[in-house]
Image (tube, rainbow, N blue to C red):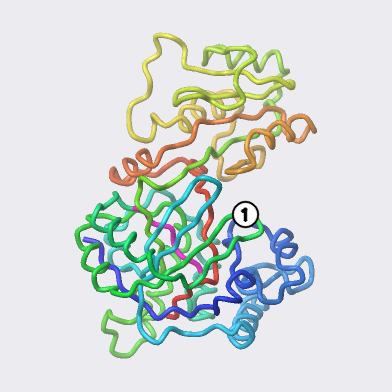
């Protein structure tokens, strides 16, 4: 059973939504965020990445950054102006990227269910990132961007979504990256609450740090509370829930700075001992169980040698795991991709052209293009209580921060 609830969103007026909405805080660095927000004082990046309004070199976890976040948030509420809905509502959020369309339900999900693993995870979180977003939520007393959840599709919910979309939207704009964002308010949120009670599990697709931070913020606010009831807003976190069959996962590729002391010839010979190597290969694998490698200005296709028994297990059998075990670790000496500075991850729309650029410009010695992990892989790993290898999934299109804010 999925316990969701309506909330009184703090949101921009329709004519300011495009100016205010911003990419998620964690898909851009400080320099990129500063460039995106340049000339736009209403950009939500001034709240989610407030260091962009402070001098270069400012510690992004320093006290002054969180103080500036509060100042910028208060100013945006005034100048946006951001307004609070009169009644708790549930919303629909549609994103269109090219010919791909997905429509999610925006509501608050239960932190109790997150703690009980009824909202299932597939990724470990880093403490420093948790610390940052926990503090950000606490100083703002708000969750400013949603956690991206998925669920096994429900025909009942699909029908209710289609009914709601016949009405006029709250927001409808196309962002600078060409992605269209449309939001509707649900006229009868109780129907959605009841329908989600038949959904056995929700799954975090993207946003593990936001979810973990919401749980930590709840623990702190509960400790400070007098007469805690469990019904307070801080017991729930902001989500957008998409049916699994609508989601699009792109490849999360790898580039490695050096060949671990080997010459190109020695490296290629070592690879041939672990893989069947086809020269003049494809830049993108055509199916699961294939990998593409860019070396010396040319693409190679890799497969497991004939007669090799594929690894078993929901995690060990993933293409990203096989590449890690048979090549990145055993040949290139990359033991922990979370900490090794020799490896870089290239996700999403940057594609194979970015891999070629890095190698051709000497910024990487070799690069690997992978077949995308599937949503069913993600669900199976989550159901098994396992953890996906780092940088296994890249979801596109990205949702926008600042459109629907949950005050806690």
Q: Residues within 10 Å of mark 1 (few under 14, many from 20)?
A: few
Quadrant where the C terminus is found in the figure: bottom left
- At a point 57% along the width and 27% down the height, the residue shown is 284
Is disc 1 placed on a helix, strand or loop? loop
Q: Is residue 75 magenta?
A: no
Residue 38, given in percent of the width and then of the height, sits at 76, 68
Q: Is residue 148 magenta?
A: yes
- Main SS, magenta residues: strand
Residue 343, given in percent of the width and then of the height, sits at 64, 38
108 lies above or below 316: below
Residue 277, given in percent of the width and then of the height, sits at 57, 13
Residue 102, given in percent of the width and then of the height, sits at 43, 52
Q: Quadrant of residue 388?
A: top left
Quadrant where the N terminus is found in the figure: bottom left
Name the side, left or right, on which 43 lies relative to 143: right
Q: Which residues are magenta?
A: 145-150
Front-lying residue, 18 or 278: 18
112 lies above or below 95: below
Q: Which residue is mark 1?
A: 178
Q: Quadrant of residue 387?
A: top left
- At a point 55% along the width and 47% down the height, the residue shown is 98
Name the side, left or right, on which 360 lies relative to 123: right
**Total residue callouts:** 1
295 lies above or below 141: above
Name the side, left or right, on which 73 lies relative to 216: right
- At a point 62% along the width and 54% down the height, the residue shown is 178
Whether residue 31 is visible here, answered yes or no, is yes
Residue furthest to the top: 307
312 lies above or below 101: above
Whether residue 215 is visible here, answered yes or no, is no
Residue furthest to the bottom: 226
């Amino acid at each position: 059973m999925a316990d969701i609830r309506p909330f009184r969103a703090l949101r921009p007026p329709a004519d300011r939504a495009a100016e205010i909405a911003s990419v998620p805080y964690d898909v851009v660095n400080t320099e990129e965020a500063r460039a995106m927000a340049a000339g736009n004082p209403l950009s939500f990046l001034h709240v989610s990445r407030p260091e962009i309004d402070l001098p270069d070199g400012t510690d992004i976890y320093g006290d002054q950054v969180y103080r500036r976040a509060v100042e910028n948030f208060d100013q945006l509420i005034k100048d946006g102006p951001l307004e609070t809905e009169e009644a708790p509502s549930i919303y629909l959020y549609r994103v269109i990227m090219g010919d791909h369309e997905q429509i999610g339900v925006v509501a608050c999900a239960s932190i109790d269910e997150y703690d009980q693993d009824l909202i299932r995870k597939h990724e470990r979180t880093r403490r420093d990132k948790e610390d940052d977003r926990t503090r950000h939520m606490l100083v703002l007393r708000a969750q400013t961007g949603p956690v991206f959840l998925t669920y096994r599709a429900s025909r009942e919910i699909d029908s209710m979504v289609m009914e709601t979309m016949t009405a006029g939207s709250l927001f409808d704009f196309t962002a600078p990256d060409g992605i269209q964002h449309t939001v509707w308010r649900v006229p009868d949120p109780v129907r959605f609450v009841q329908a989600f009670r038949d959904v056995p599990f929700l799954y975090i697709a993207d946003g593990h740090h936001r979810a973990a931070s919401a749980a930590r913020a709840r623990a702190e606010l509960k400790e400070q509370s007098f007469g805690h009831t469990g019904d307070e807003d801080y017991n729930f976190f902001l989500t957008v829930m998409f049916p699994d069959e609508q989601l699009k996962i792109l490849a999360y590729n790898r580039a490695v700075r050096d060949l671990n002391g080997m010459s190109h010839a020695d490296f290629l010979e070592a690879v041939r001992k672990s893989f069947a190597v086809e020269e003049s290969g494809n830049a993108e694998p055509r199916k699961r169980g294939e990998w593409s490698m860019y070396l010396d200005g040319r693409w190679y296709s890799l497969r497991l040698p004939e007669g090799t028994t594929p690894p078993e297990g929901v995690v060990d059998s993933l293409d990203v795991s096989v590449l890690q075990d048979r090549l990145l670790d055993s040949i290139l000496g990359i033991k922990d991709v979370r900490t090794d500075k020799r490896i870089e991850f290239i996700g999403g729309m940057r594609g194979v052209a970015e891999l070629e650029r890095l190698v051709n410009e000497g910024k990487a010695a070799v690069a690997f293009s992978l077949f995308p992990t599937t949503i069913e892989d993600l669900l199976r790993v989550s159901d098994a209580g396992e953890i996906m290898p780092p940088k296994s999934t890249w979801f596109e299109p990205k949702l926008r921060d600042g459109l629907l804010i949950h005050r806690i």
